[in-house]
Amino acid sequence: MTPAKENLLYEGKAKKVFSTQDPNLFIVSYKDDATAFNGVKKDTLEGKGALNNRISNLLMQELHKSAIPTHLIKELSSNETLVKKLEMFALEVIVRNFAAGSITKRLGIKEGEQFQTPILEFCYKNDALGDPMINQDHILALGLASQEQIQAISSLTLQINSILSDYFASMGILLVDFKLEFGKDGDGKICLGDEISPDTCRFWDAQTKQKLDKDRFREDLGDVVEAYEIILHKILSKASN
Ligand code: ADP
Ligand code: TMP
Ligand code: ASP
């Protein structure tokens, strides 16, 4: 049985998090709000919340097939999902397969260049500081995670990259880069939380290199929701094959 929604615990830029009658479960509600550059650019994109809810849940189900633990329990409605309550690490874990976004400016690399190996980056999840990039020494020194936890998070992240890169490649999409967030469940087990969606990944059409993610919003390219719909349709057509 689905536990009833109780209190709004947190409202972020893209989602609301509610407690439920079950102390181990939360309900996340996806909003239509779009923000970029740490909330400086804002808009409302009708339908984005429902698309991200659907896409993220389908991708987490795909990861479950490879025994990757995620917070997903059950999709409840077009924009709400029942998830395992996690104690989140204050970390954003980024994987880059092709050069795009901040790394092109930071390291002077041309957009689209394929890296010889995937790059793993950690950011300190702190809006007031603009989520600065940190390394493993910072994580240990600040007590954000232990050595074993960093190891487990890194290993899960690279596995997820491999699974999702192959999955999207099979539908003609390049998984350029993406951001993950992890937390600990009630048993101390590390699980993938938050979302995997065109808000948190860069997806390019492999042939045309058309951008099919939040960069359409960041760069004012238009047709943002339409791009997210293309990603959902590709996932659904693969599932029905
Ligand atoms: P932000 O906080 O960056 O504005 P969101 O609007 O997406 O982002 O807010 C969702 C919040 O919920 C994030 O802070 C995220 O870390 C947190 N979160 C995601 N999944 C879970 C979970 N299963 N348990 C607890 N917190 C979660
Ligand atoms: P970046 O190139 O801007 O550093 O972004 C790397 C990846 O992380 C990209 O797929 C977008 C995603 N991302 C988020 O999900 N949230 C954020 O706040 C930022 C800055 C990036
Ligand atoms: N997630 C950040 C924001 O909402 C930055 C981004 O995605 O570009 O402002």
Image (cartoon, rainbow, N blue to C red):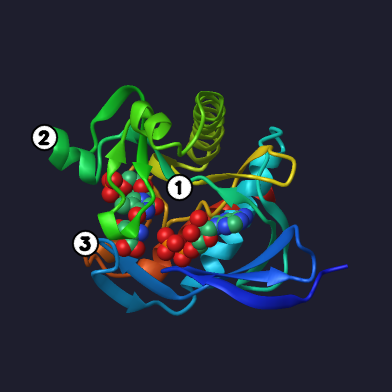
Tell which tag, 3 or 2, sits nearer the viewer: 2
Q: Determine which residue is flagged by label 1.
A: 90
**Residue 202 against residue 127 in the figure, above or below:** above
Mark 1 surroundings: few (<14), some (14-19) or many (≥20) residues within 10 A: some
Q: Is residue 231 left or right of residue 191?
A: left
Between 205 and 47, which is closer to the camera in this rendering? 47
Q: Report how far apart the C-alphas of labels 1 and 2 lie in the structure.
A: 28 Å
Task: In the rendered structure, find residue 108 and report the number of the disc placed on it.
Answer: 2
Say which element carries label 2: loop
Residue 103 in the image, given as x and y percentages of width and height: 22, 38
Identify the residue at horizontal 64%, vertical 73% (top origin).
Answer: 78
Q: Determine which residue is flagged by label 3.
A: 219
Between 10 and 51, which is closer to the camera in this rendering? 10
Q: Report how far apart the C-alphas of labels 1 and 3 lie in the structure.
A: 27 Å
**Residue 83 against residue 149 in the figure, above or below:** below
Q: Mark 1: which amino acid?
A: Ala
Tell me which numbered mark, 1 or 3, is placed earlier along the sequence. 1
Q: Is residue 216 left or right of residue 169?
A: left
